Image: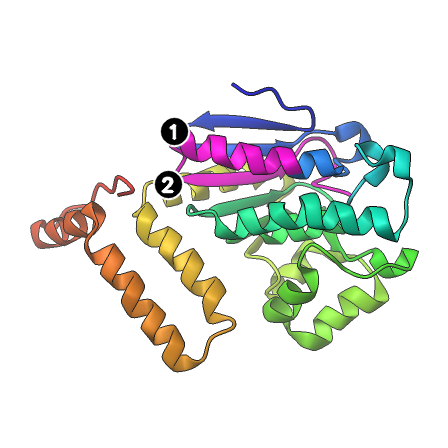
Amino acid sequence: MTEYQTIRLDLGDSVATITLARPERLNAAPPEMADEIVAALGKALEGGARALILTGEGRAFCSGADLLGGRDRSHGLGGAAARAALEGSYNPMMLALAELPIPIVSAVNGPAAGIGCSIALAGDFVLAARSAYFLQAFVNIGLVPDGGASWTLPRLIGKSRAAEMMMLGERIGAEKAEAWGLIYRAVDDEALMGEASALASRLASGPTLALGLMRRGLARALDQGYAEAMQAEAENQGIAGNSADAREGAMAFLAKRKPEFRGN
């Protein structure tokens, strides 16, 4: 298996797990981490993964970007370095997560700040330990949100709450995040990985082709009109309807048994 310097990739039972693995830096993400995540997503699909878990090692999920921790060290901090890192590494990672054809479960075990907040919210289902929090910290250091946050947050929680997160730069605890609709569920810390694994396994046993089309349809519908969304649904239904999983679902329904989906 490919060796990674900043993450771990584990494959098993059709579920891949990517763990952000710089616990000594609270999993702060240098550009290399973004590049390794993109590579790991490809390996996960090649390995037959039908669902993905994203989590962090140690006390944090991800404390934000770390330009000084990677190849940009010689350039120091600055607008040019930040822009280059976003365009060359972080943005491609976020797009790769958005376009992944399998469901993503985020298991947020601790602080998810800056780009770490965006990575966490890339999950279709975001589970957070009750001790975890979400933070758009950029305003506190004179920067603006990135990693797609200015697009994602108002769509998840509305303009007013997005402005609160972005402009006040205050922590949003897991339970408040659930109440806002920012995440799927807040859970007890000790139950986090068990619940994330159970949910990912449930998704992995489902009709993966259809689930991937749902991911794509949900993302596109955010920018489509009603008629366009229905047309996209029709196109996706044409693809899903020709799948082996759809045939299995129909036969299982007629036979009054549980379907055995294989993701094709």
Mark 2 nearby-residue class (10 Å; few <14, some 14–19, many ≥20): many
Q: Earlier in the sequence, mark 1 or mark 2?
A: 1
CB contact under 8 Å: marks 1 and 2 = yes
Q: Secondary structure at mark 2?
A: helix
Q: Residues within 10 Å of mark 1 (few under 14, many from 20)?
A: few
In the rendered image, residue 66, in percent from the top left (x then y), is placed at 81, 40
Q: Position of residue 196 (x, y in %)?
A: 51, 41
Q: Quadrant of the C terminus?
A: top left
Residue tagged 2: 204
Q: Residue at x 78, y 58 (%)?
A: 136
Instruction: State left or right for residue 156 relative to residue 57.
Output: left
Residue drawn at point x = 29 percent, y = 65 percent: 235
> Residue type at mark 1?
Asp
As rendered, which of 145 and 39 lies closer to the eye?
A: 39
Question: Does residue 185 lie above or below 192 as drawn?
Answer: below
Would you say 41 lies left or right of 6 here? left
State which quadrant residue 205 falls in: top left
The residue positioned 79% from the left and 32% from the top of the image is: 70
Q: Residue furthest left?
A: 255
**Magenta segment: does it hold 51?**
yes
Q: What residue span does the magenta drawing correspond to?
A: 35-63
Residue at the disc numbered 1: 13
Give left or right: position of 220 versus 204: right
